[in-house]
Amino acid sequence: MSDGIIELACLGRPFQLGMLYDCRSDALIPGISLWDFEMLKKNINIRPQPNTDFKIIASDSSEDKVAALNVSASLEASFLSGLVSVKGSADYLNDNKKSKHQSRVTLQYRTTSHFEQLTMEHLGAGNVKHCNVFQEGSATHVVTALLYGAQAFFIFDREVSSNENHQEIQGDLQASIKKIPLISIEGQASLKMNEMEQEKMNKFSCTFHGDFALDNNPVSYVDAIKVYSELPKLLGEHEENAVPMTVWLYPLKKLDSAAAQLVREISVSLVRRAKRIMDGLDDCDVQCQDLMRDDIAIEFPEIKDKIKKCKDLLSEYKTVLQKHLSRLLPSIRSGGEEEQELADYLNRNERSPFQGALVTKYLNEREREMNVVRSYLDIMKDVPVISSSNELDKVVLKASNNYVIAFTLSSLNEDEPYLSDLGNYLKEQSCNNGEQVSYNLNSSKKTEKWFCSGDVTAFTRENIQAFLDFKEANKGKENIEFCIASIPDELSTASSIHVYERGRLIIILLLGSTGAGKTTLINVMVNYIL
């Protein structure tokens, strides 16, 4: 491929015939040309290339997205590294699901209008006017042909609740989207929906990415039908609004041996490895967002803060990866470095604390911690949760409360060695000019997590039952209040009970792990309160 004609997706970039291009960095080079503008306009070969089709894309995978836009592996590598910025319909590449509880189906509309190419009047021997461009070395190829047209992506999303069947919702969504091209042909009068169908449609949201100038972007199913039916007209009466969709690049080396060239392409296998790493980081980001939206994370900010810190560290690491790849790819393509440099870099990533298995393990632990806490709250469903120390102070200091009995979760604020590993690794990378460093998995050697211990779960449930029994025994008393709070306490594992008298903490009961149980709790409470 390095010495032949290259066919690329334009991805919304403003290609023109005769424009220079650097395939080493996948960059357009405006303002410099081999010909004068007037000469370029003459003898261009133009022919019609009409074609229109549509496609239903049921998956949100990056593989399906690059396939829909005909993105080559090499161009995909440049996109992943941030070398290439996309516009118009190609912004579909950047539109990822925000939650795993989200059903998505995409409708792709694609039309082509005409094909333009340079001729031998431009490329023949002696016809290049500005030969000094070859010696500059800033470009490797010249644009010799363009296919014009336009495309659009209608992305339909629907949130799926925990009590709904995800597969069933996906099927309904897909069936509804398939109707849009047919309705656009038959007219909106054919759109007849009963009340149940209308209710389903109202749950869909629509996002539009296209090469068309719209007055208003569609946000609903009905909006999408209207816009879809108008797309052919928006191309213009003489297709004057068509944009470059596919470009053909001719090597400058074939016009002059002094020109710069693309020495080698990045192998598909390495592009796929880099893609898997980026996709893994994106998947973990989605998992972080889901966890942060969970009711337990909202009620206990300590949990949410840990997840947010993990999310921020992953984002920072992705930026570091992209920066390094954006330096490495052009260097390899120009022959400055061997492809093995990229392979080694990816190998080091797979041994870093940011490797997918470790990040997933950490987030799964957070999810389990939240599920364990949720199970405790379900048992104490009638007891209010106090989400901050300030709110707890208000309850404890309330004039009408002689006593406050707080069931406390004491381990939610524990240090996270793995997050420290991530932060330290990024700092060491920064000190080594972005080069990845060796990593010893110290965080994996820590003791068993409290929420993974069966013994801890058992005695915590005993504590909860004792707490609830005492609450029931004092039912109807106006001077005593019961609540749940998160209060760090190194002396207790998972839980304890704090007793406050007129705004002052008078006792902390460490139950279960110390052998105390329901009887002890009742006796202590009687001594202090009754």
Image (cartoon, grey):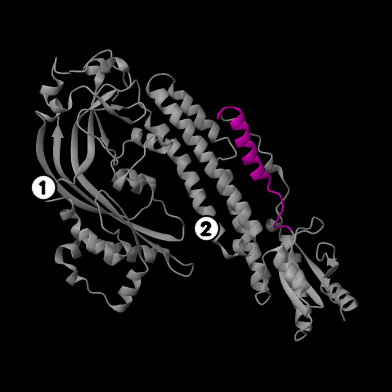
Using the rendered view, name the quadrant where residue 34 is placed.
top left
Q: Locate residue 301 relative to residue 460 in the image: left or right.
A: left
The verdict on residue 431 being magenta is yes
Disc sitting over residue 290 in the figure: 2
Q: Residue at 13%, 25% (x, y): give it.
A: 39
Residue segment shown in magenta: 411-435
Binning the other alpha carbons within 10 Å of mark 2 as few (below 14), some (14 to 19) or many (20 upward) gives: some
- How far from the left and from the top, in percent, is residue 282? 47, 47
Callout 2, which amino acid? Answer: Asp
Using the rendered view, name the quadrant where residue 441 is placed.
top right
**Residue 386 visible to an observer of this rendering:** yes
The answer to whether mark 2 and mark 1 are in CB contact below 8 A is: no
Binning the other alpha carbons within 10 Å of mark 1 as few (below 14), some (14 to 19) or many (20 upward) gives: few
- How far from the left and from the top, in percent, is residue 124? 13, 19
The verdict on residue 461 being magenta is no
Foreground of the two, 371 or 22:
22
Dot in front, 2 or 1: 1
**Residue 462 visible to an observer of this rendering:** no
